Image (tube, grey):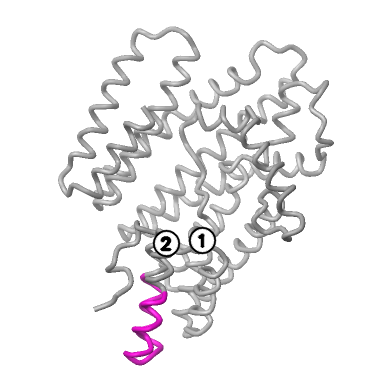
Amino acid sequence: MCIEILAIQTLQYTDKSNRCIDKLHELKEHLVSQQRNVSPSSTKTSGVYWAGCIDNALANAFARKNDFRLALAALDDVQDCLEDAVNLLITEWLGDEEGNDKAEELRLRNVLLGSSKVEVLSRQGRILLQAGALQEASYLFQRASDEIVSVKEFVGNVGKRGSDGEEQGKTKLQILHDHLEKITLISQSPIQIYINEGLLHFAEKSFDKAMKIFGEALEILKQQSQKFSPVQLQQEERDEKEVNYALFLSTSPIVSIIEKTIGLEGDENLLAHCQNNYALCSLYSCRMKEAVSLMESLVRINPTYFLTEALAFNLCTLYELGSDGAMSGKKKKVVQLIAKRFYLHDIGTESFRIN
């Protein structure tokens, strides 16, 4: 079904009609009809996952067409399934194992549910920002902030307790605690709150406040990337760390189960979004050179990760504003050549603003 959903999603880029949305609704109806006569819990778990994936795809398709009400409704459907999804997740992971601390198990349920709600509420609030509904977006962002309390407390306790790396002799619940921070949906929940606040200040034209908040989010993201990802490590340490990180991702049942059960994934491009928003804030604060310098540094660090359609458009726009015609044309062509060199075919030619 994963390939089927991906194939349907491509229709929104190749077909300007509503075929993508129609096909997703047909797929969802087919899934619902299948689940009616299902009794095994494992199959139900799979059904919850795919229902979440389809609703996510619908929300993205509606938002792309600026059908904001329908996008919000699709995310409401995602949120309605979250509690069942988390309960199924805990049941599948812990099973009938004895000796688990019920209080810890409850906190685990709360942190998974809380981080999932933060993700959904943040998406809904940002859709409302696009529609110009600042007051309603602020309300949803506040709800997301209320959900983050349990996540921060739980992750903080895990970090203080630490992990000795030895899983032998531990219960499944203890192993899950040790690896909790490595799950993207959970580790990025606090960052989502920073981004929400920064976007709200940006919409209110408080660019200095927004820039400060995005800067704080950047610092946290960089610390996390150094802790969990090999990208920021020194070259002599990188090979060993990459092997360990890849081994964790490939062998950890925790990561695969959560992605499979909830059907809701964290945004792996938060760092790029924060840096792009930080650069835009510096632009609107009349610090254009600083904005250009930051965007160019992102491209130099990792073009395949940071050179997105939005960054290319913003950077080329700044070239037009800060350079004469001939010089800005040369710089824009360099950005286009970099995109071609790294096969970034998803960036349209219009993003480079070349006449």
Specify the farthest residue to the bottom: 324
Left or right: 155 as drawn, with respect to 83: right
Determine the main secondary structure of the stretch shown in magenta. Answer: helix
> Is the N terminus in the top left, top right, bottom left or bottom right quadrant?
top left
Taking the spot 24% from the left edge, 49% from the top edge, the residue there is: 67
Left or right: 173 as drawn, with respect to 118: right
Q: Residues within 10 Å of mark 2 (few under 14, many from 20)?
A: many
Report the residue marked by disc 2. Answer: 308
Taking the spot 27% from the left edge, 20% from the top edge, the residue there is: 30
Figure disc tally: 2
Specify the farthest residue to the front: 341
Specify the farthest residue to the left: 17
Left or right: 227 as drawn, with respect to 313: right
Q: Magenta span covers which residues?
A: 313-334
Write down the quadrant of residue 258 in the picture. Answer: top right
Mark drawn on residue 226? none
Q: Nearer the viewer, residue 285 or 273?
A: 273
Q: What percent of the width, then of the height, locates residue 128?
A: 35, 54
Q: What percent of the width, then of the height, locates residue 260?
A: 50, 28
Q: Earlier in the sequence, mark 2 or mark 1?
A: 1
* Residue 318 sits inside the magenta stretch: yes
Report the residue marked by disc 1. Answer: 272
Name above or below for residue 314 compared with residue 245.
Answer: below
> Is the C terminus in the top left, top right, bottom left or bottom right quadrant?
bottom left
